[in-house]
Structures are given as structure tokens and as C-alpha cells.
Amino acid sequence: MSIITSILLAAASMLPALIASVGRCYREKDMLSFALVFLCGMLEATFISAFFHADYMMSLFDKYGQSIHSYLSYICIASLTGNIILSLMMFVTVRNIDKQHVWKWILGAFALFLIVILLIGIAISMATGCSFDQGFFAACCGVMGAGGVAWGLTYKEICVIGNIYMEAGICLLSALWFSWSTIKVFRQRRSVSSGLLMSAGILYGLAYLIGFCMICRHYAMPLEKAFDLCYHELIVLASDWHTTYNIVNYMIFILLFLVLTLGNILVANCLLRISYKKTGN
């Protein structure tokens, strides 16, 4: 299987979800439906754009392992399988998602996205004989690079935007959601304990806001230079922690990101549920 064929099949697999999202938007005309249309349209546009950058996609595969090009068909099948799973998930999401369970669907989608990358990583490691760590890291780099070129960005630019600015921004939003939940609890209960909780929540959100501003200021430079700076800092961390560059990436950009974001969201939702139950009583 060629990479062009796999891209075309992946784009075709996304069409049912895109059509279903447009139909839902036409029927319901709410923000959730518009968001689903935008998400499906963005994924479809990414596949179409990747088709016109197939040569660059080939060069991405060639970077990871000397023999990977000879196993391109095997890797394309694994990538296509992952994309079809993603497309089916989007179709089911469009048909069944409701406003009350948006966060659960988002978390499930992110988990499935990681599974897709795992499939590609396993394929790379089996094809080239490298370790799973190297295969998974190559898959992450390939997905980032492919997504970047589909939107006219280099690998370095998409890494800075996605791993630094977007992840920091999402962490900040999750912390502000936690802060807002403590304010909501205080407004409903008006007790001393809820007042202290609200104060802690506001300070917590401010700490994230200050951290986000510090990150933006630290990397306030052209994206290419910001990538080089971050790369050298990760190398230093890997040396200090007596581990590898890949492991440091996993710990910061996957593990730490998930712990902070999911922790903030889950605790905030628990606070809101407890508050609503007590108010109902």
C-alpha cells in the first residue's frame, strides 16, 4: 500500500462523520454542533492537505530508521487502521454526544488518539527492529510533523505550538475551571469552609496564570529558536535525571500534562456535583 492510497482512504473514512456533523448542526444549531462540524472539517482538511504533501510525509518516515522505507506499506496499513478507528470514533461521537457528558467524550477521544499513536509506534518498532520506546517516539514525531505540514508549519513550529503553548494553555484553562467551580460552590453554600476553598481555588488559578505567562515570556522568540532552546533544556533535564531525552518528553508532555489537566477537571466536576447535591437537599 502506498502512502497516497492510505491518505485517500483515511480521508474517505472521515466523510461519514463530517456529513453526520453537518446534519446535526442543521437540525440543532447549537454551539456543540458547530464545534463538531469544525472538528470533523479540520480533520478532513488535514487529510486532504496531507495528500498534497505526500512527498514530505515520505521524508518523515525515512528519518526514523534505516530500513523503514522498505516497510512503508506495513506502516501505512497500521496508520490507516488507526485513522479508521479515529474516524469511527468521531462518527459515534457526532451521533451520540450530549452536553452533559462532553468532558467524558473529550477524554475518551484523547485516550483513543493515544491508542492510534501506539499502533503506529508498534508498527515502526516491528518494522525496523528498534525498541518500542524509539518506535513510539518516532510515531509521535511523525504525527506532529504530518499534522504540521498539513497546516503549513514545519516540524519545529508545530512542536512549539502544540507541546508548549497549547498544552500550557489547556492546563491553564483546566485550572481556571477548577477556580470557577470553587466560586460556584461558595455562591451556593456561603459558608466559611467554602470561602476558604474559593480563596485557595483563586490562588491556584492565579498560580497557573503566572506560570503560563512565564512560559510565554521564556519562549518569546521565533518558533525555530524556541524549539532549539526547549530541546537543549530537555537534554539537560535528561542528564540531571539520569534518563533519556525520550523519557523526559513522555514525562513532561504526556504524563505531567495529563495529570494536571485531568486532575483539575475531575476535582472541579466533583466539587460541582457535591455542591448541587447539597443544594438539592
Image: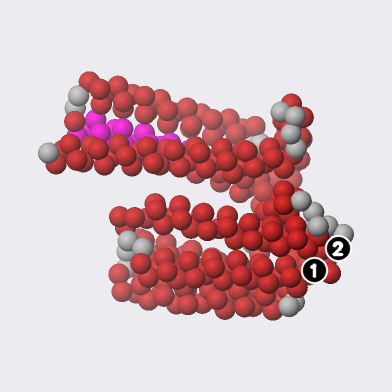
At label 1, which amino acid type do we have?
Tyr
Q: Mark number for residue 15?
A: none
Q: Is residue 215 left or right of residue 127?
A: left
- How much space separates mark 2 and mark 1, taking CA atoms? 7 Å
Q: Is residue 16 above or below residue 216?
A: below
Q: Quadrant of residue 66?
A: bottom right
Q: Residue at point 53% right, 66% down?
A: 86
Residues under numbered marks 2 and 1 in contact, where contact means CB atoms less than 8 Å apart: yes
What residue is shown with label 2?
Answer: 67
Magenta stretch secondary structure, dominant: helix
| Magenta region includes residue 199 | no
Residue 44 in view: no
Q: Is residue 263 left or right of residue 136?
A: left
Query: In x, y percent, where is residue 49?
Result: 65, 70
Q: Is residue 269 above or below residue 141?
A: above
Q: Is residue 141 left or right of residue 39?
A: right
- The quadrant of the rendering that contains the N terminus is bottom right
* Magenta-drawn segment: 172-188
At label 2, which amino acid type do we have?
Ser
